[in-house]
Amino acid sequence: MKKLGASCDWDRTRFTMEPKLSEAVIDVFIDLYNKGLIYRGLRMVNWDPQGKTALSDEEVIHKEVQSKLYYINYFMADGSGDFVSIATTRPETILADVAICVNPSDERFKAIVGKKVLVPFLNREIPVIADDYVAMDFGTGCLKVTPAHDVNDYALGQKYNLPVIDILTEEGFLNAEAQDARYIGKDRFAVRKQIAIDLEEAGHILKIEEYKNQVGTSERTGAVIEPRLSLQWWVDMKKFMAKNPQVLDAVMNDEIQFHPAKMKNTYRHWLENIKDWCISRQLWWGQRIPAWYDEKGQFVAVAKTLEEAIQIAQAANGQKPITLHQDEDVLDTWFSSWLWPISVFDGFENPENEDIKHFYPTNDLVTAPEIMFFWVARMIMAGYEWRGEKPFSNVYYTGIVRDKQRRKMSKSLGNSPDPLDLIAQFGADGVRMGMLLCSPAGNDILYDDSQVEQGRNFANKIWNAFRLVKGWEVKPDSEFSAEILAANQLSADWFAGRLYAALLDIEEKYKGYRLSEALMSIYKLIWDDYCAWYLEMVKPAFGDPMNETAFQTTIHFFEELMKLLHPFMPFITEEIWQNIGSRKDGESICIASYPLPSGAAAPDLSRVFETIQQIRNIRNAKGMSPKEALAISIKAKDESLYAPYFFLIQKLANVSNINFVNAQPEGSTLLPVDTDEVFVVLNLVIDAAAEKEKMEKEISYLEGFMKSVDAKLSNEKFVANAKPELVEKERQKRADAETKIAVLKKSLGL
RNA sequence: GGAGGCAUAGCUCAGCUGGUUCAGAGCAUCUGCCUUACAAGCAGAGGGUCCUUGGUUCGAAUCCAUGUGCCUCCA
């Protein structure tokens, strides 16, 4: 972070596991418990047999895998020899079956509903029940019900009061409940293979199909998740949301703004379908759950300390002595993270302290879209629950960096470049610039070296501009001709205007949290407007000095540009800023005042620039050396758009002589500039046919354009309905096109 | 299966309340230049039925619907 130039308050770092912050976590747990928002319940959890812990739904990654669908026959208990078939991808779970379920409107199975079938190998009798939940068109239409090992089956089991048989240990091995000695003590996957073979041999397999299905895996260990029943602590989110409706409302009505706003939909959808939050984790690190149990493992109380727990227990049991032990489980890490905006300022310990009063709610939260639910939503919840106020006003969702194949950067794939290597290779500024330039809010960033290379090139460009400016010899204005002074002043006026427009533009983009676009504007302002145009405009001929005023203005512009760029490229901008003027001790660009837009009226140089570009273009097209000076004539409607700027055309397009004319000079070539005409005498043989063809192409294009404008203008409804200024603009467009066509036609001798 | 999002130049994306935007940027490509700040550069150029098909409208890349494809989240 420091190497990247992150501008943090490094004196105030905090960690969620610090004693003070941990205390806040425990207090919050107790508070929620006392408010009736936390309960302990036997629920189906995502069990990671490798990590031996429950995971929240958000920590489970669903992956598509190729597996097998086994069709297994269950014989009727009446000894008739009839059987029903079910389809499953997990044949080992048949040992935990407690029922068979069919759809009540399925004609095929109406006869057997209410009868009993036998679980293969165990010969346990289980009932056939009927429920709408079963899809008639999937598998065989018969569903095996295994409440201990499937979420939906668990719900069915609850509904029909079925027993729960749990055949798995926490490590994912079969336990004694499986009853069949061949499988007890073995791994679930080994049993899956073995039981399939055994079933086949015993004539219980109807068929086996290849099947693609989604399997949940642990985000942390990668192990396949087993749905498992266990006692866990939960936050009752429905109740919580009913108590804090602002959590959703504040985002929907933009009291808390999401950038980009499209994230609001995802947020709303999640909250409207929110499920209870499993907050207990079976890990060895973390904040221990402040729940206390007696010798028999019976829950007794929630309390901060053993003493308090004992007090509560003894108050209930008539002051009998009691031995208690604390819950072995710890809290989900997000259970501490969601308190961050408050706990970081000690807002639980001391709700009225100066820090939290000053900083809460903060302005912006910058984070990844993937933790919108884990973290962002829950911080908002905590904010309203404990401070009655939003924790922040804006959430900026960054992109996720992916490689060129759109894969997430990960250690296991080895596709993530080491940021320190990148910094060594391209510079911290280059890396920042490259990444920031191509990362609009909420979009993925496809990483490629060429991006940071562009950043480095930009740093290099700035450095070269600095070298140029620092190398100038400066003399008092009195030693320069009035022409040069005026010319430089004009150039400065022009750039001041550009800078002013850019400042407004950049401000707009910041307001809309379009950081990459703001940076792009700065990039172009520096590279195109300042370096390519302005510096070339004021650059003295080789060996010549520069006048004092122009020099100071140029330095001033440079400083302003460095300030604009500083948030994106902190190192080079500080370095240049320190060296471009004299600074006092302790002065730094990062605390210098930000450039303010000043309403400078900029001269309109658009036609001058177009003239320059046209001349460069023709020179290029004709393969002429830029060293060869050209003479031009201009036929313009408004000569004042050119006359004051002859020096610019001469300097930037290497033109020796300019004059105004009323007609095309003999032997000259036409360069259309807007609706004006610029003529250049090229001392070489012109391919007349090619020139003619080019102009004809231009004419037919303009005529087509005019036709489309005419179509609009002759449409009465358009003229009647469109805004008057728009109609006027269309008329102007038509007139301009007409003039241009006339110019070209005349040049062709038509 | 459900929900949300996206589809614009070779690539990554802008295009906010439909009309100066007969479509814009950066990168990449091509051409010409070692022009005394910069070849990590300079000067130019080419390149798009704005995914399909309908609809609303005087007018649609923009709004609506359908289809197709991709992504994300949840079952």
Image: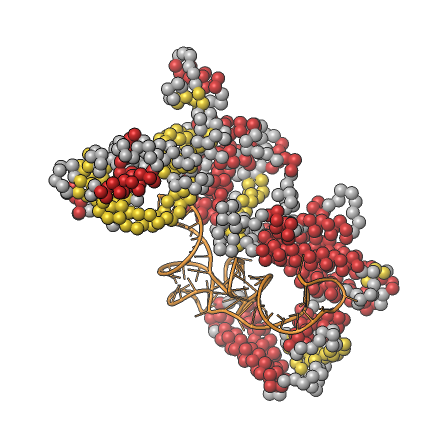
Q: Quadrant of the N terminus of chain A?
A: top right
Q: Quadrant of residue A51?
A: top left
Q: Nearer the viewer, residue A145 or A372?
A: A145
The spot of residue B34 in percent (x, y) is: 72, 69
Q: Quadrant of residue A270?
A: top left
Q: Nearer the viewer, residue A480 or A565?
A: A565
Relative to A85, residue A322 above or below: above
Does residue A164 appear left or right of residue A27 in this picture?
Answer: left
The spot of residue A597 in percent (x, y) is: 69, 54
Q: Is residue A311 visible?
A: yes
Most distant residue in the right direction = A479
The residue drawn where x is 69% and y is 46% is: A590
Q: Is residue A35 visible?
A: no
Does residue A532 appear left or right of residue A90 in this picture?
Answer: right
The spot of residue A106 in percent (x, y) is: 20, 47
Relative to A346, residue A638 above or below: below
The spot of residue A289 in percent (x, y) is: 46, 27
The residue drawn where x is 45% and y is 19% is: A309
The residue drawn where x is 64% and y is 53% is: A426
Most distant residue in the left direction = A80
Q: Quadrant of residue A155?
A: top left
The residue drawn where x is 47% and y is 73% is: A716
Q: Nearer the viewer, residue A378 or A445?
A: A445
